[in-house]
C-alpha cells in the first residue's frame, strides 16, 4: 500500500539584531546616489555642452571677419614697422662722432696777369688813345676818327688838334709797307651847299684828301695811299638827330692787302 510522504517542517529562525550594528547604524553614510539626485546632473551637463557648441559656432562665424583688416590699417602697420625698426636701431646704435679735421691752409691763388695789350705788327694799340677806334678782321684793319677832332664845321682843312692824332698813327701805318691805305671821308645827311663845297660829296672828298696829304708829308709812301669821299651814303646811325649826325661825320683809314697780294696768298 502506498506510503504518504509529508514535508518536514523547517524550523523558523528569528533574526538576530546585532547590538553593535544597532549601535553604529546612525553613523553609517550610504554613498549610492538617490534616483532623484541624478536628474539635475544630467541637465547641467547638457546646458554646459550646449553653451560650448554655441561658443564654437560663434567663434567660427566671427573668426574670418576679425582676420580681415582694412587696407589702411595694414598699410599703416607695414609703414610703421620699418620706422619702428629704424627707431629701435637708432636707439640701440651708439652715435659715433667723427673727428673734426683741422683746417688745412690753402695757398691763395695768384691773381692772373693782366691781359696782354692788343698789338698790330708789334705796335700796342692802346697807345693810340681814345680818339681812334680800331676795327680788325682777318684781312682789314680800320681806324675810325671823328671829324669833330680833325676839322671845323663845314671845313676841310686839318685843325691843330688833329695833327697829333694822325701822328700817333703814322708809325703803325708804316709798319707794313705792303699794305694799301685807303682814306675815306664821310659826312652826315645835312646839306651844305656852300660856295666851296656845293654838296657833301665835295666836302667828304676834300677831307679825305687833306688827311692823305698830311700822311704823305709825314713819310707814308704815296703809292700806298688812296683818298675817296662817300658823303652821307654810309651812315653809322640811321636816325637824323644831333647825336647820330656826330657819329656819321668821320674819317676812316683802312689798311688792307692789295688785290694782287690777296690773289697771291690764296
Image (tube, rainbow, N blue to C red):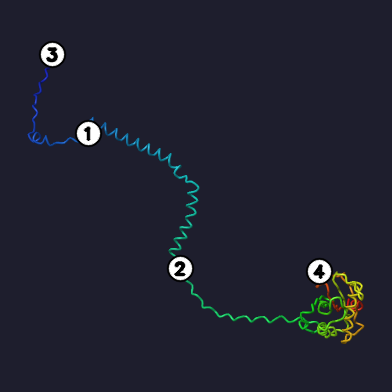
Q: Which residue is mark 1?
A: 33
Horizontal and vertical percent for residue 29?
Answer: 16, 36
Mark 1 vs mark 2, foreground winner is: 2
Residue sitting at 17 percent across and 35 percent down?
30
Mark 2 vs mark 3, foreground winner is: 2
CA–CA distance between discs 3 and 1? 59 Å
**Quick check: marks 3 and 1 in contact, CB under 8 Å?**
no
Mark 3 vs mark 1, foreground winner is: 1
**Quick check: marks 4 and 2 in contact, CB under 8 Å?**
no
Residue sitting at 92 percent across and 75 percent down?
195
Neighbour tally class for label 2: few under 14, some 14-19, many 20 plus, Cα within 10 Å: few
SS for callout 2: loop
- Which residue lies most toward the top here? 1
Q: Is residue 213 above or below residue 84?
A: below
Q: Is residue 93 above or below residue 264?
A: above
1 or 2: tag closer to the N-terminus: 1
Q: Which residue is mark 3?
A: 2
- Which residue lies most toward the front here? 195
CA–CA distance between discs 4 and 2? 73 Å
Horizontal and vertical percent for residue 26?
Answer: 11, 35
Q: Is residue 200 above or below residue 69?
A: below
Left or right side of 92 for 163: right
Horizontal and vertical percent for residue 47?
Answer: 32, 34
In which image quadrant can residue 221 be found?
A: bottom right
Q: Which residue is mark 2?
A: 95
Q: Which residue is mark 4?
A: 237
CA–CA distance between discs 4 and 3? 189 Å
Please identify the quadrant where the N terminus is shown: top left
Amino acid at each position: 500500500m502506498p506510503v504518504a510522504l509529508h514535508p518536514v517542517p523547517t524550523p523558523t529562525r528569528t533574526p538576530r539584531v546585532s547590538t553593535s550594528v544597532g549601535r553604529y547604524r546612525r553613523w553609517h553614510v550610504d554613498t549610492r546616489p538617490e534616483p532623484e539626485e541624478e536628474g539635475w546632473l544630467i541637465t547641467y551637463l547638457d546646458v554646459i555642452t550646449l553653451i560650448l557648441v554655441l561658443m564654437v559656432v560663434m567663434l567660427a562665424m566671427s573668426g574670418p571677419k576679425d582676420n580681415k583688416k582694412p587696407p589702411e590699417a595694414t598699410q599703416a602697420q607695414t609703414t610703421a614697422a620699418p620706422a619702428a625698426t629704424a627707431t629701435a636701431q637708432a636707439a640701440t646704435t651708439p652715435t659715433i662722432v667723427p673727428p673734426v679735421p683741422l683746417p688745412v691752409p690753402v695757398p691763395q691763388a695768384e691773381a692772373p696777369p693782366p691781359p696782354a695789350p692788343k698789338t698790330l705788327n708789334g705796335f700796342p694799340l692802346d697807345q693810340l688813345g681814345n680818339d681812334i677806334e680800331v676795327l680788325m678782321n682777318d684781312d682789314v684793319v680800320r681806324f675810325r676818327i671823328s671829324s669833330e677832332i680833325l676839322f671845323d664845321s663845314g671845313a676841310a682843312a686839318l685843325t691843330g688838334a688833329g695833327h697829333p692824332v694822325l701822328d700817333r698813327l703814322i708809325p703803325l701805318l708804316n709798319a707794313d709797307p705792303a699794305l694799301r691805305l685807303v682814306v675815306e671821308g664821310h659826312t652826315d645827311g645835312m646839306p651844305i651847299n656852300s660856295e666851296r663845297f656845293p654838296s657833301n660829296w665835295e666836302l667828304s672828298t676834300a677831307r679825305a684828301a687833306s688827311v692823305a696829304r698830311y700822311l704823305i708829308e709825314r713819310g707814308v709812301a704815296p703809292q700806298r695811299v688812296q683818298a675817296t669821299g662817300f658823303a652821307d651814303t654810309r651812315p653809322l646811325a640811321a636816325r637824323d638827330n644831333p647825336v647820330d649826325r656826330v657819329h656819321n661825320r668821320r674819317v676812316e683809314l683802312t689798311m688792307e692787302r692789295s688785290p694782287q697780294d690777296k690773289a697771291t696768298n690764296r
